[in-house]
Amino acid sequence: MVKLKLLVEGWANFNSEIWEDYASVVYIENNNHRIIFDPGSSREKLLSALKENQINVNDITHVVLSHRHLDHTLLMGIFPKAKIVTEKYLHDGTKIYEYHKNIFGKAVEIVNLSGHTKSDLCLLVTTTEGKYALSGDLFWWNFDEVQEKDIDGLAGHQDRFALKRKISESLLEDSRRKILSLADFVIPGHGKIFSVPKI
């Protein structure tokens, strides 16, 4: 049985002169895999959550990165035995391999999309409660924004950083709609977990 635990709920404030943010961090157990999705940038919050959930850094087999921004990746090095999974490659020390999207088993599927960056990675995790999409920043909200509750609002929410990188809004919306069509729940990069609205 797959175990999924949200360790850190992501938060962001990009309104002030000095930005402050940290990413959602998720722990997954499936078969012999112990996975951290997006270790984030808040050492205090991550270590506290690991201790509270009795998770040892040496037991983590894989760290999966949704994209390469530091607020999602900075702490990947605190897991000394973990292999690192990026959008295309598995990094095992000095060795680099291409991997299959089901390297963690059928219940944990890697989905490669684009929208927040040119290369985003999501995990679809099937649990007894339903299917969770760990979306990275394909979905994220600033602390003062209201999270949309309908499909069109969720899919069309403006991502100011994607716009700055000149990434097509339609590409981002298509990727979001794909996630929403596949999942029952979404854990965004910054913001509260939400249930996918039924059409």
Image (cartoon, helix red, strand yellow):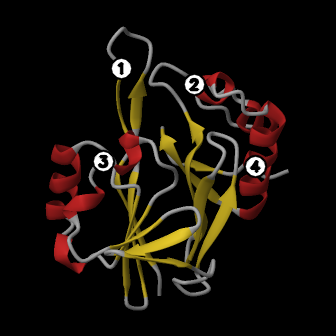
Circle nearer the viewer, 2 or 3: 3
Return the disc, 2 or 4, that comes first in the chain's sequence.
2
Q: Which residue is mark 1?
A: 19
Callout 4 amino acid: Ser
Whole-number angstrom distance, CA of label 4 to CA of label 1:
26 Å
Q: Residue at x 24, y 42 (%)?
A: 42
**Image: 153 above or below 26:** above
The amino acid marked with disc number 2 is Val
Labelled pair 2, 4 in contact (Cβ < 8 Å)? no
Residue position marked by numbered label 4 in the rendering: 175
Query: Which corner quadrant of the image does residue 116 belong to?
Result: top right
**Residue that protrudes farthest toward the front in the picture:** 94
The residue wearing badge 2 is 146
Give the crowd class for mark 2: few <14, some 14-19, many >=20 residues within 10 Å: few
SS at mark 3?
loop
Q: Nearer the viewer, residue 145 or 44?
A: 44
Left or right? Give the position of 137 relative to 1. Answer: right
For this view, does 46 lie left or right of residue 134?
left
Which one is nearer the viewer's eye here, 121 or 128? 121
Question: Mark 4 or mark 1, which has the lower sequence index?
Answer: 1
